[in-house]
Amino acid sequence: MAVSKSHVFVGALAGAGIAVAAMAGAGMRPVGLGADFQSHLIKASAPVLPAAPGAPLSFADIFEKVSPAVVSINVTSRAEPLSARRIPGFENFPFDLLPRGQGPGEGDGGDSPRAPKQQSAGSGFFISSDGFIVTNNHVVDHAEDIKVVLKDGKELKGVVVGRDEATDLAVIRVQGRGFPFVDFENSSRPRVGDWVLAVGNPFSLGNTATAGIVSAYNRDIGENFVDYIQIDAPINRGNSGGPTFDTYGRVIGVNTAIFSPSGGSVGIGFDIPADVAANITKQLMAGAKIRRGYIGATIQNLNDEMADSWGLGGRKGAVVADLVSGGPAQHAGVQPGDVVVAVNGHPVASPNEMTREVAKVPAGDIARLDVFRNGKERTFDVHTGLRPSEAQLALNGGPGAGDGDSEGGPQGARSAPNAPILGMSLTPIDPASRQQYSIAAAVRGVLVEGVKGSSDAGEKGLHRGDVIVRAGNREVASAADVSAAVAEWKRAGRTSIPLAVSRAGRTLFVPIKIDG
């Protein structure tokens, strides 16, 4: 997709002159609400719109049936600043989830160090007759007061039942019974090109319908646990948490984000799929915390050049770049450089797909990994742990300073670099280099002292201070180890060799072309 610098991903939460929307989901099972809810379920026995090709005559019947279940959510909160997140393929353009709006809020006066109060509005929908409402986490995060406005204008106080920050999904509840509610689609999702209807509270205008089609499935906008539905029904600020319906009146997705040059709709919207939202909603309604499986591995994408360097042809998968010491994957025998192609029999073609499949495994259960190592397929049974919070994962994966005591040689003495290998000057790590480049004591390998800018290594971003910890299938501790690995790969007829490069506490594999 060609993108100009003015394009940004934004959410759809209306606030004090703001733009926002959010996301949700993880899991693949529909919500089961029980027989006692069925009398109030809004459901059509046949599609309201004709199945014949061409534009529908009207969406009026379906809107009349489902709109009583859609609510506006008005929130008073103290906003916390969020940093922009980057989207694969759009690294130069921020994806902003701006809870409670962006720009100035409603200040409470004085010199209080607390964040000012802000008023914002989002959307939601009843998922049961006894007051449970689905919305986005960012709509109610940090909320001090929640007011739910029904279609008839009646206001009710809402309370948060549960929320899942990782998927940006939340459930709130109002007191009462007999509310009209809708159900998630759980059998046959619409095809690309099928009509859909989005209902919500754009710009705090209240119950509003917009129509469009399903544009695509499986959109990746940088979230670990969700593959989004793309729709072209206009959704705007304030639509966050609102439903998108198929022509049967079933919820096929939760309105979440838009891609826009200005903050308004340009026909590119993203919904959390029904199966994902239903699974999370079911757990939150039951008062459960979302517990995702964890194996203690850093993974990265397997691109074509890397696959060729390992002799895997056109295979897809996720590369194990690094392991948590003593973690579940290491304990099971998984090694850096293993290429995971399936989890519990489900093929994985990317790191996000692997993360989602592992997350589905309850902590303590087994995640069976099918991997390729040295050109041979192997299987490892990993007893999963409980996935830490995203904040904990980021903290644990951050850079660490070495203590400088694990390598021989006097402080300040530096070995002379060897002859260039793959366009790089390599030297052993000593205490001085550990201190200079903040290399953690646990990192073992060979230090990059310099890189020829015109080399493949230089063009792929390697630079002075990087540490090569593996070359091909072997760990390395010297330039001679790297040279031997390159020679081995060259004899095997490979044109590139994967190097595991450690930088700032993180390790990734980079395929480097073999010269000659």
Image: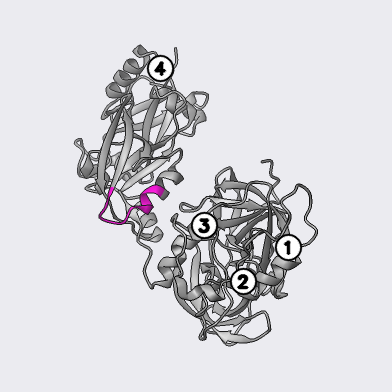
The image shows residue 86 at horizontal and vertical percentages of: 55, 51
Q: Which mark is residue 123?
A: 2
Cα separation between marks 4 and 1: 54 Å
Cα separation between marks 2 and 3: 22 Å
Q: Which mark is residue 186?
A: 3
| Amino acid type of the residue that numbered disc 2 sits on in the rendered structure | Ser
- Pick whichever, 12 or 29, lies toward us: 29
| Amino acid type of the residue that numbered disc 1 sits on in the rendered structure | Thr
Could you tell whether 189 is left or right of 37 in the image? right
Cα separation between marks 4 and 3: 47 Å
Image point (36%, 44%), residue name = 298
Residue 184 in the magenta stretch? The answer is no
Do we see residue 465 in this rendering?
no
Image point (53%, 54%), residue name = 187
| Amino acid type of the residue that numbered disc 3 sits on in the rendered structure | Asn
User: Mark 1 — residue?
Assistant: 210
Do we see residue 1 in this rendering?
yes
Q: Which mark is residue 494?
A: 4
N-term mark: 2 or 3? 2
Mark 4 vs mark 3: give the one in front: 3
Image point (45%, 38%), residue name = 349
Image quarter of the N terminus: top right
Residue 360 in the magenta stretch? The answer is yes
Residue 174 vertical position relative to residue 301 in the rendered view, above or below: below
Q: Residues within 10 Å of mark 4 (few under 14, many from 20)?
A: some
The image shows residue 207 at horizontal and vertical percentages of: 70, 73
